[in-house]
Image: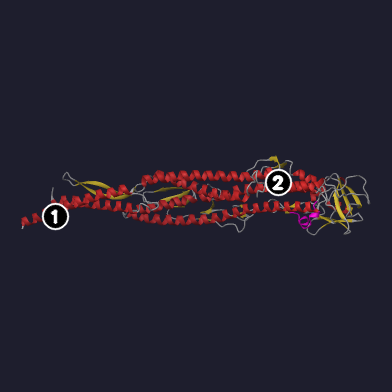
Amino acid sequence: MSLRVASSIATSALRTSEVGIAVASSNVANAGTDGYTRKTAATVTRDTGVSTASVDVTSVTSNVDRFLLKTIVSAQSDLGAAKTRDSYLDQLQSAMGTVASDEDSSGSDIGSMIDALSDTLATLATAPESESAKAATIQDLSDLAETLRSTSSSVQSLRAQADDEIATTVDTINDTLDTLNDLNDQIVKGKALGQNTTDLEDQRNTALKSLATNIDVTYQVDDSGLMRISTSSGKSLLDSSVHELSYTPAASVSASTVYSASGTSGFNGIMLSGSDVTGSSLGGTLGALVTLRDSDLPAQQASLDELATTLMDTLNAIQNQGTAYPAPQTLTGTESVSASDALKVTSGTLRVAVTDSSGTAAEVLDIDLSTLSTLQDVVDAINTMSNASASISSDGKLVIQADSADNGIALGGDDGAFSTAYGMNDLLTGTGASDIKVAGRITADSSLLATSALSDTSGLTAGDTVLTSGEGSVASALKAAFSASQSFDAAGGLTGRSTTFASYAGAVIQNAATLADTASTAYDSQETYTSSLETTFSSQSGVNVDEETAAISTLQSAYEAAAAVMKTLQEMFDTALDMVQ
């Protein structure tokens, strides 16, 4: 073997040891760096042609299990979705209130407030003439309505929060895609120049996992080092350039705000390259937010609305069977009508009575509704009375009033069918949980609460007693409504059922609690699973400081041995030169 070949072999050994030491030292220095993977110097033996091989470094590579990385990326998407659902559904459960325990009946939930109202109505039923009992009833009913409105508002606030967070998440996704695009450029250029790009690849993998937390993705890396990323439904997010998402949140959110592809009557679509991807399987935080905003939270609103509307329909039907004592001078309907409208009630007898403050009739008119066709016919019939008049107001409401301020108007005779149809004596107003409230006139004057009913005795005329102070049939019916089973339609996550108001309210609250508990369990499970994958990845691809330190020691010994060979070769070369001089 010539001195030149020996020198080449020794130089190669020095260079290989030097690169190995640098790589191992970098591993130790970055052992605590998030996303860093262990690097190794790949070597190859080269034939020198004299039966002796040299060793050279061909590249520096990362020790990464690509299949495990794909599994982690997928798990990150599930974790992002689970974490988001857990957070929102926990807030929803809090908004629903706390169910009272057996020891404590003062729960803040809707069911407890219904129970409190039921107790107050029991008192009213025993003393229907009591002004304090009426005032207490209206106060409890107002509190219940306020709680329903507040709970509904909390649900809509969560929807608005989710909608705003969708926009924020879209921005975050776009920022991450920009980062990935920059890293793609650096890696592709570095590989083309034969440079070490493993640290850049680690950064890209970290950014990829961050992206997957917000949206479910698939990806592949080509031979040039370029990473291509798509949504789970196949829409490209990153190739040679970034394809950004875009979203504009709604200006305001109410129970009637729903997703609309056109964006003209509700939530806008999430756009990607001109396509609306809102309905696709977005996954991650973004997908969870869309599902919460458009499905989970509206379902909870629907069950609240079912409770509110059933409560309104039931109590209003009872109230419209009766009258306050003494009767009010004016009754104004809540339904929007016009004179030419066909009658909503076409059978039975409507009794219209004008009474004084003691319940004595000034005038009584019985109207056979089967002989009339339109609402104007009823107005005309009432206007034949000497002590009362009827009209349709400028805002389209039926108005019946006693002509004298000393008298009042009471309706009866048809089990409240006519009064209910036109809302002449409604106790509650609104369209659902978001706007339910006690009728303004009753809130202002609790004595207008109907507790008794107009006498149904036939042939009543002026001078007859048509109302009595102690008559409490309507008050008793109100009390009975809270102990009787009511019919509830399927709404939200609840099936149709026949149960009490308090039990249905409890089911609404329990449903929210179940959703929150399920979400919490799913999040804990997913977090554990993802953490175990990361641990496995770290054990396979992470840095073991002890092993790297031992490797550095071994490489230093090899470096010193190669250096000694080089020194010896240099001395032999010098001796050979001296011999030829």
Q: Amino acid at mark 2?
A: Asp
Residue at (44%, 50%) from the top-left corner?
A: 209
x, y percentage for residue 350?
A: 86, 48
Can you tell which quarter of the image residue 510 is in? top right
Q: In the rendered image, is residue 293 in sight? A: no
Residue at (51%, 46%) from the top-left corner?
A: 523
Residue at (63%, 48%) from the top-left corner?
A: 98
Q: In the rendered image, is residue 367 in sight? A: yes
x, y percentage for residue 114?
A: 70, 47
Question: Which type of secondary structure does the marked residue at label 2 adopt?
Answer: helix
Residue 439 within the magenta-colored segment of the rendering: yes
Q: Earlier in the sequence, mark 2 or mark 1?
A: 2
Question: Which type of secondary structure does the marked residue at label 1 adopt?
Answer: helix
Q: Which residue is mark 2?
A: 115
Q: Nearer the viewer, residue 359 or 44?
A: 359
Quadrant location of the C terminus in the rendered image: bottom left
Q: Which residue is mark 1?
A: 570
* Label 2 – label 1 distance at C-alpha: 101 Å
Is residue 235 toward the left or the right of residue 200 in the image? right
- Tell me the magenta residue range: 438-449
Q: Residue furthest front?
A: 103
Neighbour tally class for label 1: few under 14, some 14-19, many 20 plus, Cα within 10 Å:
some
Q: Is residue 216 above or below residue 330?
A: above
Q: Nearer the viewer, residue 100 or 325?
A: 100
Is residue 101 toward the left or the right of residue 142 in the image? left
